[in-house]
Image (cartoon, helix red, strand yellow):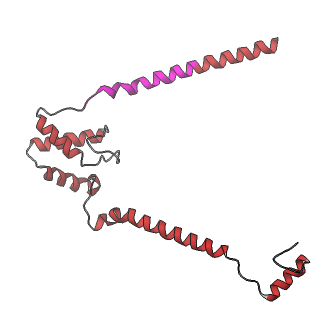
Amino acid sequence: MKARTISHGVFETTRNLLAILLTAALFALVPLSAGAGTAAPLAADPVLEERLMTLAGELRCLVCQNQTLAESNAELAADLRNEIREQMRRGASDKDVVDYLVARYGDFVLYRPPLKGSTLLLWSGPGLLLLAGIVFLARTLLRRRQRGVPLPLSAQAQARARELLGTGSVEDPT
């Protein structure tokens, strides 16, 4: 009876400790939700804002790297959107803005970088990897096929095998 009470007490203590830890974890996550309701600042001119978001959709976020500037919530992306917005207010064309960002950050900022010497590997990389994979697969299959074909034994090797097996035939050891 005493062992049952002790195990019940350990269970209760463990359950209480887990409840406390879960509550503490939830309270720790509360500050993270504070910024969830903030929206990106909009320009006073909706046409300018639409132009900004269209252009930002073609530019890569330098922090996230797999999102466009329009999609990203990173601080740097917000700063770059504000910079683009200011340049557009000053009358810069989309090409001027893109040229400014490329001069500052390189072709990496473009979601579709141009085909030139410095981006040749980027454009040809997937094809080269596919070709290398096909060559590797073909070589592996050919080697496997060559290993699967038994080489004929010489007369001397056949005689030695018969001697070791103690039979009259190499093919039929029984």
| Residue 36 place in picture, x, y as percent | 33, 28
| Residue 160 place in picture, x, y as percent | 86, 83
Say left or right for 170 vs 144.
right
Q: Is residue 42 magenta?
A: no
The C terminus sits in image quarter: bottom right
Say left or right for 144 vs 41.
right
Residue 63 sits above or below residue 10 on the image: below
| Residue 163 place in picture, x, y as percent | 90, 81
Q: Is residue 37 magenta?
A: yes
| Residue drawn 27% across the image and 52% down it | 109
Say left or right for 96 vs 39.
left
The residue nearer to you, when weighing 98 against 149, is 149
Which residue extends farthest left? 91
User: Which picture quadrant has residue 5?
Assistant: top right
Which residue extends farthest bottom? 155
| Residue drawn 67% across the image and 15% down it | 12
The N terminus sits in image quarter: top right
| Residue drawn 15% across the image and 34% down it | 43
Residue 113 sits above or below residue 173 on the image: above
Q: Main secondary structure of the magenta part?
A: helix
| Residue 88 place in picture, x, y as percent | 12, 43
User: Which picture quadrant has residue 161?
Assistant: bottom right
Residue 156 sits above or below residue 8 on the image: below
* Highlighted range, magenta: 19-40
| Residue drawn 21% across the image and 51% down it | 101
